[in-house]
Image: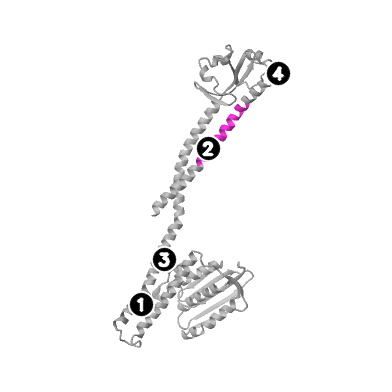
Amino acid sequence: MFRQTHIRLTLLNSLVFIILISILGGIIYFYTENRLYQDVNQSLFESVEHFQQQPSDPDDSLKRSEPKFIRRDPRIMTLVWDENKRLLTEQTREFQLFQGDEKRIRPKKLNSLEDITVGQFSYRYIAFDVQTDIGKLTVQFIRNVNSEKELLDRLLLIMLVGCGLGVICAIAVGYFLAGRALVPIKNAWHKQQQFVSDASHELRTPLAVIQAKTELLFRTPSAAIQDRILDISSISNESRRLSKLVTNLLTLARSDSDQLEMNKEVFRLDGMLKEIVRDYEEIVLYQEKILQLQAPEPVTFIADKERIHQLVIILLDNAMKYTKEGGEIQLSCRQSHSSILLSVKDNGIGIPEQDIPRIFDRFFQSDKARTSAEGTGLGLSIAKWIIEKHHGKTRVESSLGKGTTIEITFPRVQKT
């Protein structure tokens, strides 16, 4: 699939480069042609203008080999044709130069610039009719443009070779850029595949337990609830676990597609933490652990109150999960002139150093052999999303057997 996409992107990128190169080459060529022939065209038009503005008798001037009243470019030759399309002034060098090629050099159009080739020479001319006493004559001003044409031919050859090399380079660059463009797509695809695989695995476990326990209940339809209380309890626990997993998956899916918005408001962060600690008092007492709150001063925060509450619960649950009996957990918040610091610290089992960069990855769980705590590995992924939506930065410090500290720094000024 990616190979075909890579080829299509390469062709598309190459086509764009080739079109740009062709347009640039065309602009350079026509601009050079215009600049080269600008002097030629100007000389021809000036010769016509000077001729038409002379007060002398045109019949007399046409009989001269070098009309003294025509001020012109010395590179321009003058040919005069009669009504029968015959070249006059046979004694001039122009007649001798074009002798035998009268049909080729004879003007086909009047009052416009035309190009012709005679032998190995190229010319540009302009012709117009003049009414005289001896009849209507055609005056033709002509100039050799061999040097200009040779220069344009060389330029065209260089540009064709350059375009050929440019096409090769365009294909190579297009292939490279297509590969670079596919890198994030491939990474996203692999992450999606891994996400689906991990989600399927996590969903399969509680479903398998529910199915197995349900089949056991069906085998003993006459048994009392009290007799099958363990099986029913397992079904209930796995159902709650499954519901929580589906909720977390839905939250992450919506966060990826930006369907969840932050409703930011002003609230007291220290007050929220006090309420959370109060709710956890019985749980902490039952697990024989210590939960302390350090909020020495009021902290006013502009954020999504519901999401920040969810963030604190995730971090607190994670700390309690990996802290043994008799352990201590510290929850704190404080503010400075420009930021707000939220911290959760425990003296639990800690995290291996190589696992710290991955703890916020979806479905990632550290070595399960060191703890009996169960989880899906989605909580910290949701926490990371909440932190990012509030433009926060996270710092994690952990040592095996000594505990873990997660510090989150939020900017004090948030866009509402």
Give the amino acid type for the residue marked by disc 2 in the picture.
Gly
Name the residue carrying label 2.
26
Taking depth in this image into account, of 47 and 196 the one nearest to the observer is 47
**Between disc 2 and disc 3, whose residue precedes?**
2
Q: How many marks?
A: 4
How much space separates mark 1 and mark 4, taking CA atoms? 115 Å
How much space separates mark 3 and mark 4, taking CA atoms? 94 Å
Queried whether the magenta region covers residue 28, the answer comes back as yes
Residue occupying the point 39% across, 78% down: 238
**Between disc 2 and disc 1, whose residue precedes?**
2
Name the residue carrying label 4.
55
Q: Which mark is residue 222?
A: none
Q: Would you place residue 179 above or below residue 193 in this image?
A: above
Picture quadrant of residue 302: bottom right
Q: Which mark is residue 195?
A: 3
Q: Which mark is residue 210?
A: 1
